[in-house]
Amino acid sequence: MLRPMSAALVVSVFFGCNVPEGAEPEEEVARAQQEEALYSQTGVTMWSPGAQIPVCWVTVGNDASKAIIVNAVRNTWERHGNVRFNWSGICPSTGSQQFVRVLVELGSDQGGGGSSQVGMAALMNPTPNLSARSTHIALPLSGSVSRTEYLAVHEFGHVLGFGHEQDRGDNTSTSHPVCNPAGSITGNNFSSYDPESVMHYCNSGGNNSGRLSQRDIYGVVVAYGGKRGGMILSDTNSGLAVNAYGGASHLGQLKLVNNCTATNTDCTWTYRNGMLLSDTNPGLAINAYGGASHLGDVRLVNNCSPTNTDCTWTLKDGLFVSDTNPSLAINAYGGAVHGAPLKLVNNCTSASTDCTFTYRDIPIRSSADEGLMMNAYGGAAQNALLKLVNNCTSGHPDCTWSISRGLISNRAAPSLFVNVESTGTGVSPLKLTNDCSVGTARCTFTLTKGMVVSELPAAVMNAYGGPSHGAELKVVNNCSTAFSSCVFAVSGNP
Ligand SMILES: [Zn+2]
């Protein structure tokens, strides 16, 4: 449902509830049947899981805003759901290939607005008609980046088939007469009714922030499948894997079990910004429950953030060490056997295999664009360079890695390890080599806060020249989490 711009202004002034989409009145008439909202209305055609959705821009210009839009969508829907938008420049006027046609132009009020076709109905044929668009983003006159991000994430939520959350039939809260009236629309619910959804007009972000709620993250995974990281295997017995015991849920326990497979998302884990996220529900993160302490529980919780050190972990020399207290590490309590619970203890060392784990068969991605993956360039071979590339397929051996006792090995050639070519300080390439063993400093890396830190002094992995296709991976001496070229993630499907 679209609201005319004038109403949006009145509402935001008098009621403090920003209605998001100040669309032109004629669009309201033209699209009232289609523009409905993490549920999908009956009749909406969803994309297939794993879909690569072709997107083009209707007009030239507004390049800085387009970059904000692409990044906002990449960091939200694409980051969590198994869908990808392929951005392909200016829309063709001839031919037969269909695109989601996105018109970006300056709006006519401070908050801007938007509208979109919903689900696969957004695919349109080539046409030279500049008014023919699937999705419209009218940029805010205020120039607000966060508002632009909101418009992008909300409208692309529609492209993914999601309707306005407040309109769901199970919304009976009616907290606000204008932006949250009682809902009545039936459809397919991917998560429970969520007043915090980016698709809800009354969310507490004030329609001014392109963030997904926890249930948005869960919903897109239910609708499209999630990314899948890798299994975390005990070094005592590689047949035992870390499992969200009984199924991933808030406050759920973590145990070692002997019946995990790489396709069971209760057994695979994504590492992002220092957090270990459930692949069943990436809104759940592994947490030092009740605060990191000796013999403290390790559980899944739904309220983690990368700034909470009870939710972030450093993988160093095989140990998952607490970022609250580095003397505490995750332990297969009582010894690594089927059913052993995971707890934090203060007496782990790398020599105890009940305390060390192998993160098996993982892709290593740029956090700035998770479509870019670490690749043994030209194929895994002695002295092969490592680069970020955008054409890795899921599970391709040249793009798949394991981390064990700080050594990063390649799946295609498990005797080849990532190695800092020059041990001096400064910039040095990373290459594969066969002469690594546990404790070799130039071959040893720690995963912390999303950074891949060499054991050598002042040497952190960097997508040299910026995270883009073909960027060489090198170590540099000036990385921090503030630089997107220095931050990496482990998550599944390309
Ligand atoms: Zn909308």
Image (tube, rainbow, N blue to C red):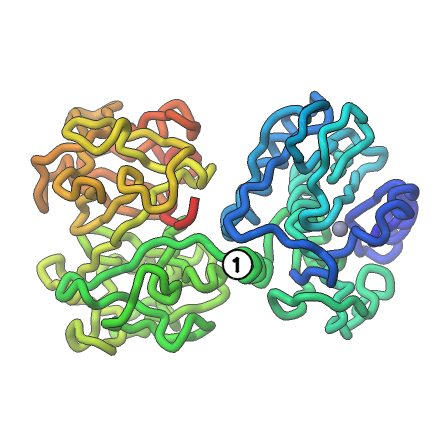
Q: Is residue 256 above or below residue 486?
A: below
Q: Quadrant of residue 168?
A: bottom right
Query: Residue at coordinates 81% horizontally, 60% vertically from top-left?
Result: 179
Left or right: 385, with 143 as reference point: left
Quadrant where the C terminus is found in the figure: top left
The picture places residue 362, in percent across and down from the top left corner, at 31, 49
Residue sitting farthest toward the front: 96
The picture places residue 388, in percent across and down from the top left corner, at 36, 31
The picture places residue 258, in percent across and down from the top left corner, at 23, 72
For the image shown, how many numbered marks are present on the structure?
Answer: 1
Q: Is residue 68 above or below residue 437?
A: above
Frontmost residue, 135 versus 478: 135
| Label 1 crowd (10 A; few <14 / some 14-19 / many >=20) | many
Can the viewer see residue 87? yes
- Is the C-beta of the residue carrying label 1 under 8 Å from the nearest atom of ligand 1? no
Left or right: 297, with 5 as reference point: left
Give the residue at mark 1.
Answer: 221
Name the secondary structure under disc 1: helix
Left or right: 238, with 161 as reference point: left
The picture places residue 127, in percent across and down from the top left corner, at 76, 27
Query: Residue at coordinates 21% horizontally, 33% vertically from top-left?
Result: 380
Query: Residue at coordinates 25% horizontally, 74% vertically from top-left?
Result: 295
Q: Amino acid at mark 1?
A: Val
Q: Quadrant of residue 74?
A: top right
Q: Quadrant of residue 248?
A: bottom left
Can the viewer see residue 342? no
Quadrant where the N terminus is found in the figure: bottom right
Query: Residue at coordinates 64% horizontally, 54% vertically from top-left?
Result: 46
